[in-house]
Each structure stands twice: as C-alpha cells, then as structure tokens.
Image (spheres, helix red, strand yellow):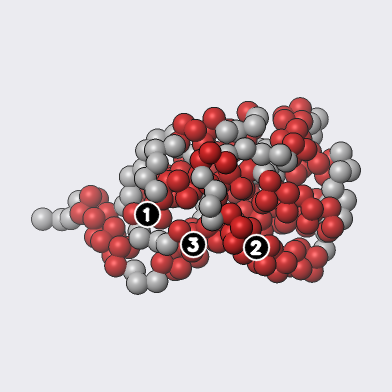
Amino acid sequence: MEPTVWDVLIVINTKMKKIKDPLQILQIWFSSSFPVGSYAYSHGLEALIDDDKIKNRDDVREYLEALLFYGSLRNDYIFLKSVYMGEEINDLILASASSKERHTEMIDMGNSFRKIMKDSWGLQLEDNTSFIYSIGKAALHFNIKFDDLIKFYLQSYISNLINVCVKHIPMSQKGGQILNVNFIDQIQKFLDQSYQLTLKDIGTSFFIGDIFAIKHENLDSRIYLT
C-alpha cells in the first residue's frame, strides 16, 4: 500500500527530532529563504526614515540599541523565555502590541511560520498565534536550547532592520555589516544583564518607536507593511 501524506510527515518529524545539531534547524528558520515574510516589515523604521529621524549609521545604531534594551525586543526575550517555562501566553503577547500594525506583524509572521511548520516540517501549531509564541513552541518540540534560539532570533531581527536602512536611508552595505558585527557584542551584553527578567518586567520605554509604528499606518506612500 502506498504511504499516505501523514506517513510521510511522521517520517519527516522523526528525522527532524534526530538531528544532532539544532543549529542546523536555526540556520534554516532564520535564513532569508525561510518564507515568513520578515522582509516585508520595517517595525516602524520606514516612518522614522520618512520623517528624517534616522539618517545615518549612528542613528540606526541608537534606534536598534533602544529597541533591544528598552523596546519590543526586550519584551520578546521575556515572552520567549516564558514560553520555554511552559507559560501559555499567546494572548498576552498579542495584547502587548502597541499599534494595529504591530499586531498584524505578530499574527501574519506567526501564521506564515505555522503554515511552513505544518506543510514542510510535520509540526502542527495553534492557529493565529504570534510569531514569538509559535517559534518558541517549535523550538521546544525540536529540543533546541533557549540560549541558541534567542541569539539567532535577536540577530536575525536586527539584521533584517539593518537591511531596511541599507536600502532606504540609504546606508552602505559596509555600514550595514559594521552594525551587524557590532550587535554580536550588544546582544551578548543584553543577554548577560537580562537573565533575571520575568513576565513582571514586561513593558517598554522606547516611545518613539511605538509612536512611529502608529504613524506608519497613515503614510501616503509605503513600501513596508509596518
């Protein structure tokens, strides 16, 4: 008898669980070829660039440092760690969105990731879950260490936003790579001082990022969805 689709998915799932090096999985998930559409979102950067608030590499560095240490990436760290601790917090994650577009970003990327997990990796995740929640659940399923996942996640997020600036400030490719290298150390610095953060520490003081995420909704001409 010919194997069914479910038989094939079970085989794929079994093989994935046997992968010895989880970094192989993370390399795939956070590569530019993994179709979650992250390139379509600027996280409010497009509005900041349009308003001449970000004009050069130093401006980009300051924005990304604030996003990491005081903004939504800090919250993402807490959320992802909480998912690893068994907390069912998808609704809380979605409620933390500071604007309609941020909420859209969370849901759309989450649903894209969920679809790929189901179609290609044999893993069924809940519908309409945020990206950070979905990726945490998938990483747990494949026995990926939190320390590995969070580094890949933060570096990928920051690299994507640097690429937005390379294209639209514009900023040189060299400048973009200098920032990527700089943020290897910045991410480690953030992780070193954030290990004690819990859900009680959720919040942001990066108000300009939130304000321009809202302002982006009303731009006359937009390239990015957020």
Residue extending farthest to the bottom is: 20
173 displayed left or right of 152: right
Q: The residue under label 1 is which amino acid type?
A: Leu
Closer to us: mark 3 or mark 1?
Answer: 3
Of the numbered discs 3 and 1, the one sitting upstream in the chain is: 1
Q: Name the foreground residue: 103 vs 37.
A: 103
Mark 3 sits on what residue? 147
Above or below, 169 against 179 in this view is: above
Q: The residue under label 2 is which amino acid type?
A: Lys
- Crowding at dot 3, Cα within 10 Å, few <14 / some 14-19 / many 20+, comes out as few
Residue extending farthest to the left is: 1
Disc 2 is placed on an element classified as helix
- Crowding at dot 2, Cα within 10 Å, few <14 / some 14-19 / many 20+, comes out as few
Q: Residue at x 64, y 32 (%)?
A: 98
**Spatial CA span between label 2 and label 3:** 13 Å
On-image quarter of the N terminus? bottom left
Q: Residue at x 68, y 46 (%)?
A: 70
Above or below, 220 against 44 in this view is: above
Of the numbered discs 2 and 3, the one sitting upstream in the chain is: 3
125 displayed left or right of 177: left
Q: Position of residue 58 (x, y in %)?
A: 84, 57
Disc 1 is placed on an element classified as helix
**Spatial CA span between label 3 and label 1:** 12 Å
Closer to us: mark 2 or mark 1?
Answer: 2
**Spatial CA span between label 2 and label 1:** 25 Å
Residue 44 showing in the rendered view = no
Q: Residue at x 67, y 51 (%)?
A: 68
Closer to us: mark 2 or mark 3?
Answer: 2
Above or below, 93 against 195 in this view is: above
Residue 220 showing in the rendered view = yes
Q: Position of residue 32 (x, y in %)?
A: 58, 59
